[in-house]
Image (spheres, helix red, strand yellow):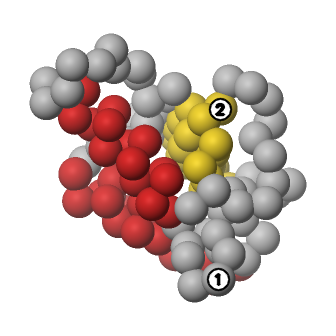
């Protein structure tokens, strides 16, 4: 599974699950995490990638999603940060670089 977190821009293709709010993204990740640890009876898909926009409309940002991933140690193979918010990008990249395992590919993407 690939998770695209952005309130405005559509995912690159139909292979991405689109979350427009931090709560939607957290709901998707929590379901995948529950399946991984055997708390749900759903088929777990491998978490291949998560792509982050920082600003999600109003006061919502994707920061809670990144912090949840760091707290639970639930990382995809690839983390993309595609936000136009420079300060937000630095924050997201910093958390990922500090807490993601070494095998996680972390990349800033400019759309």
For mark 1, what is the residue? 58
Rendering quarter of residue 81: bottom right
Asked if 36 appears above or below 3 in the picture, the reply is: above
88 or 26: nearer the eye? 26
Query: Residue 63 at what x, y percent from top left?
Result: 47, 71
Query: Residue 72 at what x, y percent from top left?
Result: 22, 51
* Residue 68 appears in the picture as rendered: yes
Query: Residue 94 at what x, y percent from top left?
Result: 47, 69
Asked if 26 appears above or below 93 in the picture, the reply is: above
Instruction: Give neighbour class at mark 2: few <14, some 14-19, many 20+ (Cα, 10 Å).
Output: some
Q: Indicate left or right for 8 with 22 as reference.
A: right
Q: How many marks?
A: 2
Query: Which residue: 68% across, 75% down?
Result: 57
Query: Residue 30 at what x, y percent from top left?
Result: 31, 44
Q: Of circles 1 and 2, which is in front?
A: 1
For mark 2, what is the residue? 16
85 or 25: nearer the eye? 25
Query: Which residue: 78% across, 70% down?
Result: 84
* Residue 89 appears in the picture as rendered: no
Q: Indicate left or right for 98 with 7 as reference.
A: left
Instruction: Give neighbour class at mark 1: few <14, some 14-19, many 20+ (Cα, 10 Å).
Output: few
């Amino acid at each position: 599974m690939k998770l695209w977190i952005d309130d405005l821009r559509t995912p690159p293709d139909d292979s991405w699950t689109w979350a427009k709010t931090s709560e939607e993204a957290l709901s998707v990740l929590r379901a995948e995490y529950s399946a991984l640890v055997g708390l749900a009876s759903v088929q777990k898909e491998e978490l291949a990638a998560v792509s982050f926009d920082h600003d999600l409309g109003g006061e919502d940002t994707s920061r809670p999603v990144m912090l949840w991933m760091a707290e639970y140690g639930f990382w995809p193979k690839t983390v993309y940060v595609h936000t136009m918010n420079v300060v937000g990008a630095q924050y997201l990249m910093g958390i990922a670089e500090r807490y993601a395992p070494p095998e996680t590919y972390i990349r800033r993407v400019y759309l």
